[in-house]
Amino acid sequence: MTRSRRTPALAPKRRLLTVAVLAAGIVAATPFAARAQAAFPSKPITIVVGFSPGGTTDTLARIVGQYMSRDFGQSVIIDNRPGAGGNIGTQLVARAQPDGYTLLMGTVGTHAINQSLYKKLAFDPIKDFQPISRVALVPNLLVAHPSQPFKTVKELIAHAKANPGKINFASSGSGTSIHLSAEMFNQMAGTDMQHIPYKGSAPALTDLLAGQTALMFDNMPSVIGHVRAGKLRPIAVTTPQRSPALPDVPTIAEAGVPGYSATSWFGILAPAGTPAPVVARLNATILKALADPEVKKKFAEQGAEPHGEKPEQFADFIRSETAKWGQTVKASGATAD
């Protein structure tokens, strides 16, 4: 009798205990990615920039980061880690925890050129990263000193072929997208213009403005002010389409070198292994940022064009760019240690 009286009293407790154990089991069995999505972001996010403050990469990262901060309700910190063509900052992110809180503003240099340019890299630009989205396309602008006798691409080609080895072009350094844009032109146009490398875009531009060099393929944000002031002559843009910032300037392809295309691009990447829900959350916010009128206006002021896409599209693009620029690096003979 005593045993039978106790049983009803204990049964509810056992049922409660069973339910609690089952609930704990369900929580434990819930995939980490799903729980990460529900909580993300719960703390500040860092975007690493592998270049100095004030450059195009840094400027675009700050514009996008500001919007992400508002959308997430969390601080977004820009961490500049310049050096080795962006490789120092890139390596830092490759080794970071894959939780979505450490991101990289990657470039055509860090994720398409450097793999072929540098003999040894401490990271794999494809295997060690999860692409989130491209952010912007920035045309390189072919500009010449006003004293030069050519005003169009066809006139430049004719002048260069009539004076082989005598036309020089400046660049921000051997192996940069600025240098390789010119080397690609040399290859496709059949010209023999000579490369004069500088330690950065600023000193190269200084000598071009002084007439010490004939021309340069520079990022649009760096030279557009000088073009508008009449200090440099715009010849053509390197992108497949004309730039809204200079709609009257033709593309190199339409002006005399069919198929030519060289674009400086920038995009957000995370370490490989970042949970898919976190990747999706980051991608959605970045796409919203690029559609925001204020962001578009700020990009336009830099001569940059917003360009958002899904992670898999960005991944495919990086692979195609790696192959294209690898051929150009090999043909140019450029190397870096």
Image: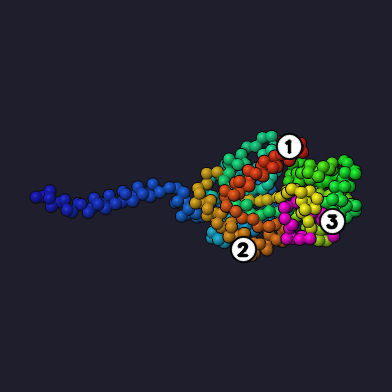
Task: State whether the magenta stretch is mostly helix, strand or loop.
Answer: loop
Q: Quadrant of the C terminus?
A: top right
Q: Are marks 3 and 2 in contact (CB under 8 Å)?
A: no
Residue 256 locus on image (x, y percent): 80, 50
- Please provide the residue range marked out in magenta: 230-248
Query: Of the numbered discs in the image, which one, if any, rests on residue 330?
Result: 1
Residue sitting farthest toward the top = 119
Residue 249 locus on image (x, y percent): 79, 58
For residue 191, which quarter of the picture? top right
For residue 67, which quarter of the picture? bottom right
Q: Are marks 1 and 3 in contact (CB under 8 Å)?
A: no
Query: Of the numbered discs in the image, which one, if any, rests on residue 166?
Result: none
Residue at 52 percent across and 44 percent down: it is 273
Closest to the observer: 86 or 231? 231
Residue at 73 percent across and 40 percent down: it is 328
Mark 3 or mark 2, earlier in chain:
3
Mark 2 or mark 1, earlier in chain:
2
Q: Is residue 96 left or right of residue 218?
A: left
Query: Three-letter amino acid code at disc 3?
Result: Arg
Query: Three-letter amino acid code at disc 2?
Result: Asp
Colour option used: rainbow
Per the model, the C-alpha gap separating discs 2 and 1 is 40 Å
Mark 1 or mark 3, earlier in chain:
3
The answer to whether residue 238 is magenta is: yes
Q: Which residue is mark 2?
A: 292
Whether residue 103 is visible here, answered yes or no, is: no
Query: Of the numbered discs in the image, which one, if any, rests on residue 233?
Result: 3
Residue 46 locus on image (x, y percent): 58, 51
